[in-house]
Image (cartoon, rainbow, N blue to C red):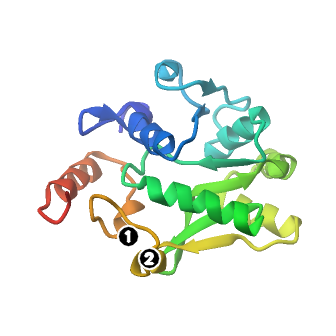
Amino acid sequence: MGMDKALVEFRGQPLVAHALKVLRGAGLTPAIAGGQPGLEVYAPVVADLNPGLGPLGGICAALDSASASLAIFVPVDLPFLPVSLIVFLLQQARTTGASVTLCSVEGFVQSFPVVLRRQLLPLLKTELEAGRGGCFAAFKAVAAKVRETISVLPVDLMVQSGQLADPRRLPASRWFMNLNNAEDLNHAESILSSPFAS
């Protein structure tokens, strides 16, 4: 987008503010992992000890500074995630005791949001240092190393059964829409301007 995606404006606020609002709405005290200078006005920034290694580097830095046993990671480019999903995903992770908890929609597992157990940090660092920086591949690899399968929350089924809902009445497939360019921003704006969204 020609600038730090976290600061790209959507509906009058930078994308980082939308992500932080969702986390705060879930009762969490968020921090920004691997953020650029200037983002500390929105929330505390956890410096990436290995800048340039992508989201997995930021995840490792955040887990390294965390004191809680579980951490949830939400990217800035998914502004349609509802608070209820974050609450339910954390509840799923606590209930199952899984080391990695993800969502699926229409049968496809999503890389984010993700709940990770802090004890995975050494294994995630190994993946990062080996140059395997892809988040989903790293999540699968570390889950296998601790002899677990990834716990997957089937979001669309939860919506159909009435256990999850979006106050804007957006379908679950929209919750995971990435905003990567100006066309995506315009499309997202048109979705929220639709008479079917409130």
**What residue is rendered at 82% in x and 52% in y?**
120
Q: In terms of image quadrants, where is residue 9?
A: top left
Is residue 22 left or right of 122 when viewed as pictured? left
Which structural element holds mark 2? helix
The location of residue 81, given as percent across then percent down, is 42, 55
Which structural element holds mark 1? helix
Q: Residues within 10 Å of mark 2 (few under 14, many from 20)?
A: many
Q: Earlier in the sequence, mark 2 or mark 1?
A: 2
**What residue is rendered at 45% in x and 45% in y?**
22
Identity of the amino acid at label 2? Asp
In the image, 105 versus 2, the foreground residue is 105
Residue under label 1:
173
Identity of the amino acid at label 1? Ser
Q: Which mark is residue 156?
A: 2
Q: Which mark is residue 114?
A: none
The N terminus: image quadrant: top left
Front of the two marks 2 and 1:
2
The location of residue 167, given as percent across then percent down, is 31, 58
The location of residue 162, given as percent across then percent down, is 41, 76
In the image, 5 versus 131, the foreground residue is 5
Is residue 46 left or right of 42 when viewed as pictured? right
Image marks 2 and 1: residues in contact by CB distance under 8 Å: yes
